[in-house]
Amino acid sequence: MKKFVDLNSDVGESFGAYKIGLDEQVLSYVSSANIACGWHAGDPMVMRDTVKASLKYGVGIGAHPGFFDVMGFGRRNMTLSADEMKQYTIYQLGALYGFVKAAGAKMQHVKPHGAMYNMAAKDAKLARAIIDGIWEVDKELIVLGLAGSELIRAAKEKGLKAANEVFADRAYNSDGTLVSRSLPGAMIHDKDIAISRVIRMVKEGKVTAINGEDIGINVDSICVHGDNPEAVLFVQTINEELSKAGVEIKSLSQFIK
Amino acid sequence: MKKFVDLNSDVGESFGAYKIGLDEQVLSYVSSANIACGWHAGDPMVMRDTVKASLKYGVGIGAHPGFFDVMGFGRRNMTLSADEMKQYTIYQLGALYGFVKAAGAKMQHVKPHGAMYNMAAKDAKLARAIIDGIWEVDKELIVLGLAGSELIRAAKEKGLKAANEVFADRAYNSDGTLVSRSLPGAMIHDKDIAISRVIRMVKEGKVTAINGEDIGINVDSICVHGDNPEAVLFVQTINEELSKAGVEIKSLSQFIK
Amino acid sequence: MKKFVDLNSDVGESFGAYKIGLDEQVLSYVSSANIACGWHAGDPMVMRDTVKASLKYGVGIGAHPGFFDVMGFGRRNMTLSADEMKQYTIYQLGALYGFVKAAGAKMQHVKPHGAMYNMAAKDAKLARAIIDGIWEVDKELIVLGLAGSELIRAAKEKGLKAANEVFADRAYNSDGTLVSRSLPGAMIHDKDIAISRVIRMVKEGKVTAINGEDIGINVDSICVHGDNPEAVLFVQTINEELSKAGVEIKSLSQFIK
Amino acid sequence: MKKFVDLNSDVGESFGAYKIGLDEQVLSYVSSANIACGWHAGDPMVMRDTVKASLKYGVGIGAHPGFFDVMGFGRRNMTLSADEMKQYTIYQLGALYGFVKAAGAKMQHVKPHGAMYNMAAKDAKLARAIIDGIWEVDKELIVLGLAGSELIRAAKEKGLKAANEVFADRAYNSDGTLVSRSLPGAMIHDKDIAISRVIRMVKEGKVTAINGEDIGINVDSICVHGDNPEAVLFVQTINEELSKAGVEIKSLSQFIK
């Protein structure tokens, strides 16, 4: 029975005069931070601040590269070549690396954002391109991706450490993929149910799929959000309920080898 | 009498479908390359290619950070705070560092671009901000700036290595500053005169100022351009004439300590 | 004694996933809306929505062009040529015109934003460039600018209608210019005093300068903000207090001829 | 037998310091100009210049809207909503309208660029969104699109004038669609054959498909390019050969009703 799990959240998404996310609050409850790298969100001042805040709360620092599309917040698919995907990853890892170095810190992981995350979950070629980019920059980085996705597969094939991510508020198909948001029942709205599911996923490695079947699921990290006070409250609750259930919150670097 | 000098050129300024600069040609004649970092010019594909081409020709790799203004090619002054200047430097150094790391190479130097270069030459506060940014990312980097500028002063104060740059095609005031381009005689159009002046600057450490007076000048590197075939021919000529005059072309890392 | 005045506010400053400003609320109290044109803030979806909301509340629609600098929210001075300033104005007026046309509406005025506003207030050449741009697009547009500024002067010289704007929360020098924010006493923090000053400015055309002297001031419009609930409350209060004092809120097109 | 045709070319694609296209040369041979609107290429200075050059050569002025992706030159598909597609069209039409108005000219047509063109050719929903945007800005504009595409269909359904475009250098399938560039024989490299095909398409309304079958094709305009001297020479040749064959070059507004 697993006794620990990572909690990760996207942070550092403010941009110039535009503020998004209650970063300081969410950082006090999670163990890993995915920091936007200035392409879909974030700017150099925000990146500096977010690396510092992550250090202050002892949270693992991760790069959160995305598409060059602030207007679409990196959520719109773009047909990029594998080589573009690779070089865009290298650029953004490097940029965050600058602030990590300046803060005397260490980068723990990489998690692609939005459309880049979704495309890399399904497209093996793009997944390998991102993995190649990470590999060339730093072979010690942990790749955080959708549990059972092409990105995880590509990371392992290459020899990079990989961490499987699950979503507390999403339903699963019986093959372990996420139920599409366009289908009924895709979202788990009841917070108590969401938390029970997460605890079971961590401790038993199982989740009830949308067709009622129990399936196996591999959980290293749970994705949570800090966009508004209600979301932060949910992060606090999930953090506390995991502890009560005997599951320790640990950042990825403490157990992904 | 000095027997060597560095030749540097801005490269990697193409952007997407837009091509600028005969990079491969100019890289075969210079010893240090200032590579655009995607903010005023360059993109990740171009940065990767330019790092590789610099390696191929054995040219020292340098970051060429600029303002976030592709439309103005980084040539338009912007009123930025010292902190913005510092973080923008860190971001861009980091981004290029990604490609340098991916290529298994080493970064040699940093030279700010355009408006950033000009502002940092005159404004001690902004110069110190840029220097602080470089210092926090990598204390071994050489700062390449206008001979006798605030940027050079700030680098030395901080303990960073600094290299003084001169321009073959520009006239100097008797205090060692460049004659403003808006004044008559600011540009040296005769290529033979330009080359003789440069050779004298390197070998004797002297140049005739616009008022006819001989002044001392400290030369570590000469700035050249590769925008068009004529410019590249001038780079070839200056390279050859320096050799004939017994001046070796060496990249900065070989003599700046 | 003047019996009416315009209230104007910057709106439409949200951008993609980033929200700024309580636009619907502030639009219910003002008479003229300055709509961002996508260069320093705003995007096409936001522009469409803001034009529609302005129509809904019967508020005069104005273009609010700024610098191409979302990261700096258009607040950072840039050294642009007069020709750049002119063409950037034409581009942004045109872009907003698209949405105004699509909504079957009419554009009432133009007010430059942030750094563009400040530079155009002081620099006669840049002011004339902006005015030339407006003139070439639509000779019927009203120019809204700092009372007594170069922009107002240039508009009148050219033959464009001009409206003088004042700030409720700023102190004035005895020559009618704003006291620099870096000086003590520049901001009027007491809301009651701010409102009394505004009412006197409108009704008597007078304001007490920072040196205690009473000076004449020409007021067509008062600039207010809708960034947060407190700011919106102030707009509501100023709106109500003006009415109580017998001053009608009218949009510019109703009285600027 | 048809005795006239329009020749159109993409122009105004330079951006800041970056130059693309021999615009002045190509404008002397074509009858309609598709002017980039600053989103995938072009900037306000370039738009002003290109509108003026089009007027000088008596060429019909068209808007050439594209995706907000200078780095990809608007050639990369993006998953945009129909509403985004519509508002992005309105924005760009409006922006070009500013320069057209400033030049005292008239806008003749709209042709979407690159990925926007391709997506609108196949996706009826996106095509209708673009058409709705054009309709709301100016009901007199002619829509220029791939012959027989969804964009043409949507334009006609809405009541907008539509012009069918063909490509001299592309092979056609027997259903009138273009042979995908990834297939052998997709490009017609022999310039004489390309020109003969074009003349036949115009005069007889027929073309030999890749399977050898003769198919009917509706031609209002031929797309040509001005990227390099060779391309411009081809435009000159096609212009001359059409004239020799008794086909007059006329801009769209002269015959699309």
Image: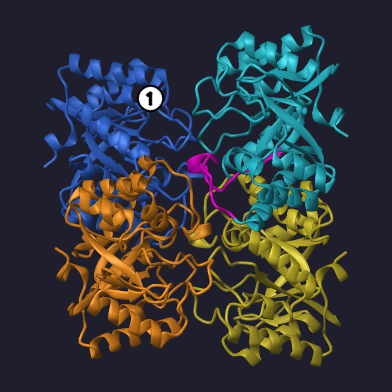
Chain colours: A blue, B orange, C cyan, D yellow
The percent coordinates of residue D114 (x first, y second) are: 58, 63
Query: Which quadrant is home to the C terminus of chain D?
Result: bottom right
In this rendering, position of residue C191 left or right of residue B49: right
Q: Is residue A53 visible?
A: yes
User: Which quadrant of the structure image shows residue D246?
Assistant: bottom right
The residue at the point 39 percent across, 82 percent down is B194
In this rendering, position of residue B231 left or right of residue D2: left
* D8 to D83, vertically: above or below: below
> Which residues, given as a range, are shown in magenta?
C63-80
The residue at the point 70 percent across, 81 percent down is D207
Task: Look at label 1 and name its amino acid.
Answer: Leu
The percent coordinates of residue B150 (x first, y second) are: 32, 53
Q: Chain of mark 1?
A: A
Q: Is residue C102 visible?
A: no
Residue at the outermost top position: C244
**Magenta stretch: includes residue A34:** no
Nearer to us in this view, B216 or D176: B216
Residue with the mark numbered 1: A22
**Callout 1: helix, strand or loop?**
loop
Nearer to us in this view, C71 or A12: C71
Dominant SS in magenta:
loop
The residue at the point 48 percent across, 42 percent down is C71
The percent coordinates of residue A159 (x first, y second) are: 15, 54
Nearer to us in this view, B107 or A172: B107
The residue at the point 39 percent across, 53 percent down is B122
